[in-house]
Image: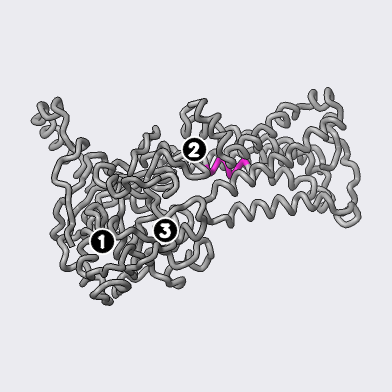
Amino acid sequence: MPRAHRRVIKPLVFAAALLPLGWLVRRGLSGTLGANPLETITHETGLWTLRFLLITLAVTPARRLLRLNALIAYRRMLGLFAFAYGCLHLITYLWFDQFFAWGEIVRDIAKRPFITAGMAGFAAMVPLALTSTAAMIRRLGGRRWRALHRLVYAAAAAGVAHYWWLVKADTRSPRAYALVLAVLLLARLLPAGITGSARPAAGGPRGRPSATR
Amino acid sequence: MIIRTRRDIPSSQITDERLYLRRREFITLAGAGVATAAAACAEGAQAQRPPALAGVRPGPFGTSEARTPYEDVTTYNNFYEFGADKGDPARHAGGLRTRPWTVRIDGECQKPADYQVEDLIKPNALEERVYRLRCVEGWSMVIPWVGFPLARVIARAEPGTRARFVEFTTLLDPRQMPGQRDPVLEWPYVEGLRLDEATHPLAILAVGLYGATLPNQNGAPLRLVVPWKYGFKSIKAIVRIRFVEKQPVTAWQRQNPREYGFYSNVNPEVDHPRWSQARERRIGEFFKRRTLMFNGYGDEVASLYAGMDLRRNF
């Protein structure tokens, strides 16, 4: 995919990634968030965090499978959207659920496994977002950057656990997310011969590491 | 059977003197409020409501708290027989046939019988009971139910000396209840009360809300309402009421005995293993409010549990 295409597609992907947020705002303005709007906002932002994490994790297997190295150009943006939705999700919890009662929040994190998992998942995403700039990649060097960014696996696993442990009885939806995550992780273990050549990417933008994660 | 009712007025029901002295002002304001509300209703979703029930009289134990709007009461439901999403019951319960509907009353009683639901309702004067409802998930509503004391149905069946518990069962019909095709819970849904809980004057069988026939998503044609317990105890679409000697195993206990106990009384001091029960979000309010012991019905029901360890008997 030539760079010219990327210049068109990238803004489109960016806009598409904003759609879930736009939809939430629209429902909020028209008063159609349901009987418990704050719960709807919490659930939706949480689900989109998890979805963007999984989409980000799908980039590398998709790139190998489709032999489409250019996909790497979208990985950082998708990962940052996961972080952005994660921030919204965390804010709704801190604000609308706990009203910034820090004592309660700390107790919640320590006592409730599903909150512990959620916080751990968010904490794992913070260094990834902070080191997502080209300057930080250069400063860390490819090898250390790659090692650090393996934290994304922990973030996704914690996200799935967070969701699973929250549900009262019907675990079908969290199980589906767990399955997708498992498939995406297993895809990384397959030998390169089956999934197509893992030819080193033709250089990410501005010398980004070309590692296949 | 003698059913004792409390004659003294609980402190929560006594009008504050300052308010009392301003009562005329209040009446004027209330009049204006009613006019505004009536106008709002006329243009609202009033037209979609089921037929009004005749001869409903105000019953005891009311609350002056703001009622949760009809729209919210009928679109935000936990009724897993129609799906686990809170919007599912309103979407999928419309097709449930609630007539003819048979309720079997049996077990340890002198007069077991199969009743048509009309015949079970008919001998009882319908009362409006405005109750708080607290869901185990941490949200709450205020709902004007229409119904009659469960004690009346129990008295009619004449339970024997071996009847210590009452077991309730919901309809089992996966064709009409699509949620029952998934093994989310072990179907049919089963609930239970101790006999003295079941005959308590607060416990009612509801057939309506907001003065009109109960919508299917709220448990038509007949549901239990026990306002001092978490919402899931108030079983919906009842087809069987059985008197038993042993404590029944309820659907949620079967699903997760560590998290859901037989009593499930609203208790801000005993947390759900996964979340706190200290506060709740009243539907329609922004800030959370403190959850009250026995959902604010302690004056009426605390004596039922005198001497019991409520942490163990959760």
Residue A123: x and y in percent read 66, 32
Residue B227 falls left or right of residue B42: right
Residue A183 falls left or right of residue B205: right
Depth check, front residue: B191 or A52? B191
What kind of secondary structure does the magenta stretch mostly adopt?
Answer: helix
Residue B69: x and y in percent read 30, 46
Q: Subunit of mark 3?
A: B
Which disc is residue B207 wearing?
1
CA–CA distance in space, label 2 to label 3: 28 Å
Which disc is residue A198 wearing?
none
For the residues carrying marks 2 and 1, which lies nearer the camera in this image? 1
Residue for badge 2: A25
Residue B210: x and y in percent read 24, 52
**Does any portion of residue A19 appear in the rendered image?**
no
Q: Is residue A194 above or below residue A89?
A: below
Q: Subunit of mark 1?
A: B
